[in-house]
Image: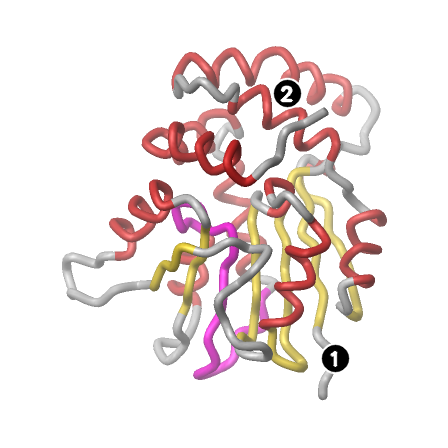
Amino acid sequence: MLDKSESRVREMFRQIAPRYDLMNHVLSLNIDRYWRWRSVRKLKIKENAPILDTCTGTGDLALAIKRRAPESVRVIGSDFCNAMLQIADHKANNGKTGVRLATFVEADSQSLPFESDQFQCVTVAFGLRNVTDTRRGLSEMHRVCQPGGQMMILEFSRPYIFGLRQLYQFYFSHILPKIGQLLARNDKSAYQYLPESVGLFPDGDELAGMMREAGMTNVTFTPLTCGVATIYEGWKADA
């Protein structure tokens, strides 16, 4: 059984934090940048109201959102791994202007320290599957989102093209763990955990159904790169 306990996952990410960004780009052949680019462009960002990126990790999605958002929009990233947030905080410090691009907060996505109905958009990229209780994570995203607001999830999924699906599974199960463990050594088998967590995590209609159960409406999903990743969108009903 896959161990998704908070203590194990937090320590795993603490150990791989220094090489987390490099490994993401190398192991995805840099396609992860494109996936985030597509995700940000699906957000219907308005003036003034803040945006929350949960499970923000080293802050790549939060910072990409801030670069596209109006200056008046505050972007907050939350994560329960302080080592990851330290890297995100360093990225957010714009030395040329002295302006911080985003604010980062240490917080568990299953119990967010924010008031309800606060954010115009709530996002998560490649982090929801690491939340111990997926339904609690989705429920918290819905709770802190404003009525009429947007929720977006970017997550790994399983390719739908025969041949590519088998090749992907072989790469994920046999090649990626070896490369990952070699370049980002840790005692938590982080890159063995990755394919296991993706393989067990719901995708497509199943995850969309869980989003609806959490209260999200008008739920849609868009496969990327033949289904290797998927963007899910949902909305919070107007009050």
Residue 171 image point, x, y percent: 63, 17
Q: Give the range drawn in magenta.
A: 43-60
Main SS type for the magenta part?
A: loop
110 is higher (above) or lower (below) than 188: below
85 or 163, which is in the foreground? 85
**Magenta highlight on residue 45:** yes
- Residue drawn 40% across and 29% down? 16
Q: Residues within 10 Å of mark 2 (few under 14, many from 20)?
A: many
- Residue drawn 34% across and 63% down? 102
Amino acid at dot 2: Phe
**Magenta highlight on residue 87:** no
SS of the residue under disc 1:
loop
The residue indicated by pointer 2 is: 172
Left or right of 41 on screen, residue 139: right
201 is higher (above) or lower (below) than 47: above
Residue 195 image point, x, y percent: 64, 25
Residue 202 image point, x, y percent: 77, 41
